[in-house]
Amino acid sequence: MLFSFSNLNSWVVGLCPPLTIDITFGEIFFCSASARLTCKLKIYKLEKKEKFLTSHNRFVRYMRSNFNDGAGKPLANDHSEPQEIEASVTASSEKVGSTLSITVVGASGDLAKKKIFPALFALYYEDCLPEDFTVFGYARTKLTDEELRNMISKTLTCRIDKKENCEDKMDQFLMRCFYYSGLYSSEEHFAVLDSRLKEKEAGKLSNRLFYLSIPPNIFVDVAKCASLRASSATGWTRVIVEKPFGRDSESSGELTRSLKQYLREDQIFRIDHYLGKELVENLSVLRFSNLVFEPLWSRNYIRNVQFIFSEDFGTEGRGGYFDNYGIIRDIMQNHLLQILALFAMETPVSLDAEDIRNEKVKVLRSMQPLLLENVIVGQYKGHNKGSKSYPAYTDDPTVPKGSLTPTFAAAALFLNNARWDGVPFLMKAGKALHTKRAEIRVQFRHVPGNLYKRNFGTDLDKATNELVLRLQPDEAIYLKINNKVPGLGMRLDRSDLNLLYRSRYPTEIPDAYERLVLDAIEGERRLFIRSDELDAAWALFTPLLKELEEKKIVPELYPYGSRGPVGAHYLAAKYNVRWGDLSGEDS
């Protein structure tokens, strides 16, 4: 059946795919980079309100085959046939153009300088931003446009493998950066920001992204002012919110309710930068696109799973902030738990954001209550190594004397479902440890009736296959297998089948913030945290955190630069597990 749309409004948004088609009472929003387009847009299903998210390759092939450049010349020769419904749409940038305005709130802070502005420049350098975009910095610090440009230029870098035109691209990017100083709670100041944005948008259809790189206690003030005084009147408005999302279930719920007074859930992008890391992205690809792994991904073959995060430095410069949260809130409740949910989820219906997040929520809701007996907490103490002295956590002048805030935690978690029943999921996170690393380690079960058992002696763990996904540093995937050492005797060795990213893929791996900021611009929510995910995560950890604080549990001390508290080893041994990062084979 052929549907014709009269008075059809269409805007050329000019963003990178994936593309979102939103059909609402005769309006179609679609994405393309062409200046003047005539399209025949195929739609497979039409209801009054329905959103379609179409994969890049399939949709772009169709768009290219049906668009022309205004003179009748097709953009490509791939001619697909319409399926059910056709709509003819003519859009001209001479009538309506579009622009993207990105406002970094808290622009003078460390996160903005070290991560957000460099990520935006990297996206510009890779041509992933629309042709017409503007970046505004907003903070209380008094700066001029030129002072902002000088400040952020010190942290901008070009791709190692693409040095050409680096200085020119950097200058072009900086000329698109502007600054406005204002209070975070002032609607009047945000109204002035709105007028500054409109000057740059020059009457075009405006899409606006606000990145809240600010303390959580002022999230709501900024969301209110931005929503009421500086949101787009013609395009979309989205807000990226940095962690922490509260301190417990109650404060998190209150933050969500407050934000939703001014923003819809689909406007809120709760960012966890670990979900943007290359190896986390590759986790589902590894599992769902390789037949060899999916049949093994259950209690039948996996003995335990370990999520390990360690830093080789303390809280230098962040002691005051860190003491309000501790390692459990800072790392385990968000980064590691989100990775666990991705690892353990069932196969989603599709790669659509809501389908993936639905499966993650099921994992979080199926977890057993986290018991104090399955948790070890620690705190690093001062340590002398040679002529160098390392301070204790409580030596930090911004940390209260006698603080019981843990800088290390290990926990054993369990899922109540058929796939993972009885499998311990071990988490370990700490500061001031012997090395910096973040990895997932999957230890498989012992081979039943192993013919070569005597070759390994009594330590069967040496014969255990192990799959390791190293998130940082030196991204890699490797599988530990047993094989015979060449020679006349029968001597076995454990070796690695290794995919080292820097060897296989010599190009520089994008920073996690680049991927996540681009996803927010495109409206792709797959790697962002939904409110019910957040509720389920806090429901798991809040009772434990309250018990630790009410009982004033004293953390076990461990030397700065060591492998952590001894209690972590006993916790693992309780479930017949050995921490994989302590074997010395790949430390």
Image (cartoon, rainbow, N blue to C red):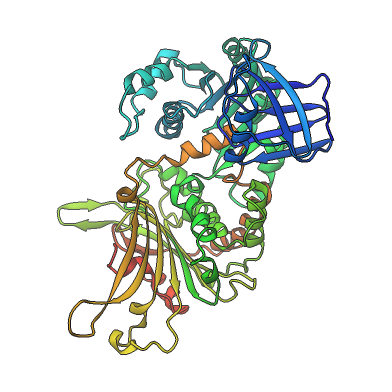
The structure residue drawn at horizontal position 65% and vertical position 28%, both measured from the top left corner, is 66
For the image, the number of numbered tags is 0
- In this picture, residue 134 sits left or right of residue 560: right
Residue 568 in sight = yes
Residue 54 location, quadrant = top right
Residue 411 x %, y %: 49, 66
Q: Nearer the viewer, residue 569 or 153?
A: 153
Image quarter hosting the N terminus: top right
Q: Residue at x 43, y 48 (%)?
A: 400
Residue in the image at 51% along x and 33% along y: 213
Which x, y percent locates residue 577?
43, 76
Q: Does residue 218 appear in the picture of this structure?
A: no
User: Where residue 161 appears, x then y in whole percent?
Assistant: 31, 35
Q: Position of residue 245 (x, y in %)?
A: 59, 45
Q: Residue at x 39, y 73 (%)?
A: 465
Say above or below: 478 vs 186. Answer: below
Above or below, 217 relative to 452: above
Q: Considering the image in quadrants, where does the C terminus appear?
A: bottom left
In depth, the one of 272 and 52 nearer the eye is 52
